[in-house]
Amino acid sequence: MATDYDSPRTTEDEVGEDSLEELKARRAEAQTGAVDVDEADLAESLELPGADLSGEELTVRVMPRQADEFTCSRCFLVHHRSQLASSSGQLICRECAA
């Protein structure tokens, strides 16, 4: 909880003298809309590299290579024909040819 070091300090005797209305007002002032975020809570939601994901399932629709696509012979990724580098005889994408 944040402490206001500029405010005058009260002793135990002075606290007992405060009225119920003053205590309610102080409590209302102390409650703010800011939420304290704990770093440990943030760390629990992160996935670390090499984590066991054997229980996870992916649903991906795999489509066959289309007539206007090719598979690069270096990176083995499927690209559109517009990405074909002008290599002689080999199907190489522009990224691998660069």
Image: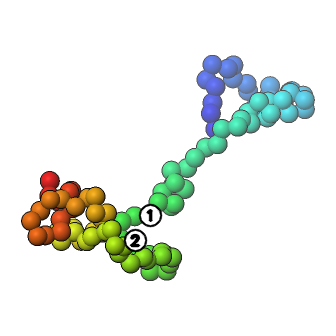
Q: Which residue is mark 2?
A: 51
- Residue visible at 63% across and 30% down in the picture: 3
Where 32 sits versus 46, above or below? Answer: above
Residue 81 drawn at (x, y percent): 28, 63
The furthest residue to the left: 88
Residue 59 drawn at (x, y percent): 51, 76
**Left or right: 78 with respect to 31?**
left
User: Label 2 sits on what residue type?
Assistant: Ala
Instruction: Describe the colour scheme in one phrase.
Output: rainbow
Where 60 sits versus 96, above or below? Answer: below
Which of the two residues, 84 or 3, is positioned nearer the viewer here?
84
Which of the two residues, 53 or 7, is positioned nearer the viewer here?
53
Say whether marks 2 and 1 touch (CB < 8 Å): yes
Where 97 sits versus 2, above or below? Answer: below
Q: CA distance from mark 2 to mark 1?
A: 7 Å
- Residue visible at 14% across and 59% down in the picture: 86
User: Label 1 sits on what residue type?
Assistant: Glu
Crowding at mark 1 (Cα within 10 Å: few <14, some 14-19, many 20+)? few
Dividing the picture into quarters, in which one does residue 73 lie?
Answer: bottom left
- Residue visible at 69% across and 19% down in the picture: 8
**Left or right: 20 with respect to 50?**
right
The furthest residue to the front: 67
- Residue visible at 31% across and 63% down in the picture: 80
Residue 36 drawn at (x, y percent): 61, 43
Tell me the number on the disc at residue 98. none
**Left or right: 46 with respect to 68?**
right
Dividing the picture into quarters, in which one does residue 65 lie?
Answer: bottom left
Q: Which residue is mark 1?
A: 47
State the quadrant of the N terminus. Answer: top right
Dividing the picture into quarters, in which one does residue 41 lie?
Answer: bottom right
